Amino acid sequence: MKNLRPPVGAVKKKKIVGRGPGSGIGKTSGRGMNGQNSRSGGGVRPGFEGGQTPLVRRLPKRGFKNSLFTTIYNVINICDLEKFENVTVFNLEKYNEFHLIKKSKLGLKILGFGNLTKKLEIHANAFSKSAIDKIEKAGGKIVIIK
């Protein structure tokens, strides 16, 4: 155990700068000569182009996202419903009872991640196409809430 050593080239020696001309990295410590980058805390922020208007501001803005009319859903995957034993009907009361949804004021959308083997009746505001396929393939029923 005494002769264990790391492989050759695996351990690098730390570079010590600013310790005289004999070290090879004295005086300016590898920072070059004068200027902003040679000083402590020097340098410019990312995207700064020397006072020229940056590219990000020169390019036009594109698109518009109208958040006024978007519907936000609580999301539940099919695999989350598969876990519960002895439950055949999932309605809003059941979702709240099992703490599957956080905000009951939002709508509820069922997504098709995972597999479904049980025959379930599922109530929700929206369903993904894959969720509809998997529920119907398992012999379940879909009820859309308005």
Image: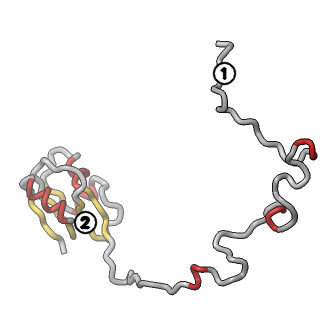
Q: CA distance from mark 1 to mark 2?
A: 59 Å
Quarter location, residue 42: bottom right
Type of the residue with mark 2: Lys
- Tag 1: Cα neighbours inside 10 Å, few (<14), some, or many (≥20)? few
Horizontal arrangement in the rendering, residue 58 relative to residue 69 (left or right): right
Q: What is the secondary structure assignment of the residue under circle 1?
A: loop
Q: Horizontal and vertical percent for residue 98?
A: 28, 53
- Tag 2: Cα neighbours inside 10 Å, few (<14), some, or many (≥20)? some
Quarter location, residue 99: bottom left
Quarter location, residue 37: bottom right
Residue indicated by mark 2? 109
Residue lying at 71% horizontally and 36% vertically, measured from the top left: 12
Residue indicated by mark 1? 5
The image shows a total of numbered marks equal to 2
Q: Nearer the viewer, residue 129 or 126?
A: 129
Q: Nearer the viewer, residue 38 or 129?
A: 38
